Image (spheres, rainbow, N blue to C red):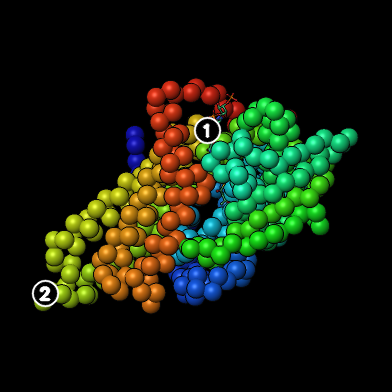
Amino acid sequence: MVDFTLSDEQKALREMAHDFAVKEIRPVAWEYDRDGTWPAEILRKAWEVGLMNSHIPEEYGGPGASYFDGCLIEEEMAWGCSGIQTSVGANGLATSPVIIGGSEEVKREYLGMLTEEPKLASFCLTEPDAGSDVSGMRTRAVRNGDKYVITGQKCFITNGGYADWYTVYAKTDPEAGHRGISAFVVPRDDTVIVDKKEDKMGQRASNTATITFNETEVPAGNLLGAENKGFKLAMMTLDRTRPGVAAMAVGIARAAFEFATEYSKERVQFGVPIAMHQAIQFLIADMATKIHAARLMTWNAGVLLDQGRRNTLESSHAKRFAADTAMEVTTDAVQVYGGYGFIKEYPVEKLMRDAKIMQLYEGTSQIQRLVIARETLLPRHIEEPATVTA
Ligand code: CAA
């Protein structure tokens, strides 16, 4: 049987996340966006009530929530402010490769660090010359006895300026393309330099930094999975985290949709509320359909993960469609507001700016289409183990 009804526990979780967004996030969201304020206090509160690190298994001190439940949380929190939720949720991206490929010792130390205190970790894949083309990265990791020495620069790193440790991808065999990349857990020390905080179009409350690793030494045991298997680890991670990004995109779209529908009932033109005009009704109808479809795709991608099944295709369907939906719906919300939509005093222009990054980070909409095309035209039957051991 296929049933989209939430259980009582799931409804309670969603309500908890929604209340948090209403009370802690919404009241400051537009101000934090304007000033680019780092939401330290909100992160601490989210950690305290269990809305951070939801994916970390119970044996390492986390709530061990399902991927599906994670999607419920991400939609509500992003409805509050997707910039703030990007900061709250970024530990999920950094810890996923650790959960998949870390040794028991590494998991206890680094996952435990995040569940014992409200600390942060960042995922370092992208480089100035290696964005969509992951295997073009230049960061090097050289084995030296029982250590690796890592040198290189990573950019667009969410929470990079505030992280206590990093999941870093580096070339261990530079001649081997994607088969020469390895992943490591790298604690922050004084060889890790935070170079630049980006001044962004949207999601301005989140921290995005350039991080340089300057001959940073890590114990060989911090290698995640096997040497030269880091590319697959990165892809497996993105399969797991893209549904959460899709859920955030649904949250942004829903926020814009709610503002637009309310406004359309209040704004009077030609003697009636604009909601009475078919031109506006059809915009609202299309927004509603897209949000509904995006949410169903997102839930589907999350449920497959919870069933232990490979979800590469569904994850890209959800991320692509939900991100494009967020962009379209927020643009249409501005349209419903007319000239006022373009003014910062009204809420929807922020949402339109925030939506843009959903089509860019964790794989652009074009990369999602590439994955969808490949999985459709030449389906790969990758037997994916639940964990990758060294
Ligand atoms: N799961 C497991 N293995 C996978 C896989 C998956 N989903 N996808 C590919 N692989 C394997 C393939 O089977 C292949 O294995 P073999 O070595 O055995 O042949 C290998 O990986 C290489 O696969 P491809 O030939 O498909 O690799 P590619 O170089 O063509 O790249 C890509 C594929 C989809 C374009 C990929 O590079 C990609 O996803 N790029 C986008 C990167 C991205 O999303 N970056 C976002 C950074 S994180 C971020 O934005 C967050 C932030 O903090 C801001």
Towards the viewer: 114 or 37: 37
Q: Regarding mark 2 in the picture, which secondary structure is present there?
A: loop
Q: Is residue 46 above or below residue 71?
A: below
Which residue is disc 1 drawn over?
A: 308
Q: Relative to 384, is 332 on the left or the right? A: left
Q: Amino acid at mark 2?
A: Phe
Q: Residue at x 58, y 68 (%)?
A: 39
Q: Is residue 193 above or below residue 378?
A: below
Q: Relative to 157, is 294 on the left or the right? A: left
Q: Amino acid at mark 1?
A: Gly
Can you say which quadrant of the picture contains the C terminus? top right
List the single residue furthest toward the front: 129
- Separation (CA) of disc 2 from disc 1: 55 Å
Q: Residue at x 59, y 49 (%)?
A: 92
Q: Relative to 211, is 1 on the left or the right? A: left
Residue 299: percent from the left, percent from the top? 41, 44
Looking at the image, in which quadrant does ligand 1 appear? top right
Q: Is residue 288 above or below residue 272?
A: above
Q: Residue at x 55, y 23 (%)?
A: 383
Which disc number belongs to residue 111?
A: none
Q: Regarding mark 1 in the picture, which secondary structure is present there?
A: loop
Towards the viewer: 46 or 342: 342
